[in-house]
Amino acid sequence: MKKLSVRERIIETASRLFYYEGYNQTGINQIIEEAGVAKSSMYQSFRSKEDIAVAYLQQRHFNWMGALSDFVSTRPSNKDKVLACFDFMAKWLKQDGYRGCGFQNIITDLPAEQGKIRDQTALHKNEVHKWIYSLLSEENYDDAAALAEEVMVLMEGAIILSQIQHNAWPIKAAQRACTKLLA
């Protein structure tokens, strides 16, 4: 097994801490200690905690979009792929103990001056929206743009409500609503 670089260890450690403990609740010294790196090595890789968070979100985006695409890839139509997003979310959220979306979590825990993190969060959500829009456009929905927005609202609301309820019922309800939208 390949040994992780200092940068990779920092991102892996920060990812876990930011996701499960929160951005503001996680300090640089905690990341350094749990990653097993020297402070000087950390600062050679990252200039700030905000830069670590951006790297965490970039990695999370890459992993999440890849897992989502893989999960829906065998569905016969783009409509089925969009509906399968909810099955993916139910599986993912249950697996993570209904901790919710790392992007939603970090944005609610964010000081106003952390613009790079806010931008990375918006980038992720915009990419998910574009992906849904492209699927619906290829399916020849006349109102694909409006439908993509509505699907995003259903998905995002379902994620946060599942986190609050610690249950998958909001995702299943959102999937039923999406089925009606795409009928």
Image: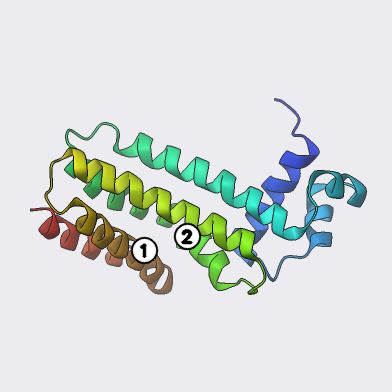
Evaluate whether residue 16 shows in this view: yes
Residue that protrudes farthest toward the left in the picture = 183
Marking on residue 156: 1
Amino acid of disc 1: Glu
Q: Residue at x 70, y 70 (%)?
A: 25
- The answer to whether residue 160 is above or below residue 127 is below
Secondary element under disc 2, as helix, strand or loop, is: loop
Q: Position of residue 163 (x, y in %)?
A: 43, 68
Quadrant of the rendering where the N terminus is positioned? top right
38 relative position to 80: left or right: right
Secondary element under disc 1, as helix, strand or loop, is: helix
Q: Position of residue 98 (x, y in %)?
A: 45, 62
What residue did someone put label 2 on?
101
Of residues 105 and 45, the one nearer the viewer is 45
Using a 10 Å C-alpha cutoff, classify the residue at mark 1 as few (fewer than 14 neighbours), some (14 to 19) or many (20 or more): some
Q: Are marks 2 and 1 in contact (CB under 8 Å)?
A: yes
Evaluate whether residue 167 shows in this view: no
Q: Position of residue 76 (x, y in %)?
A: 17, 33
CA separation in Å, label 2 and label 1: 9 Å
119 relative position to 31: left or right: left
Residue that protrudes farthest toward the top in the picture = 1
Of residues 100 and 109, the one nearer the viewer is 109
Using a 10 Å C-alpha cutoff, classify the residue at mark 2 as few (fewer than 14 neighbours), some (14 to 19) or many (20 or more): some
21 relative position to 166: left or right: right
Q: Residue at x 68, y 70 (%)?
A: 24
Amino acid of disc 2: Cys
Choose top left, top right, bottom left or bottom right for residue 143: bottom left
Choose top left, top right, bottom left or bottom right for residue 115: bottom right
- The answer to whether residue 84 is above or below residue 22 is above
Q: Position of residue 64 (x, y in %)?
A: 46, 45
Marking on residue 80: none
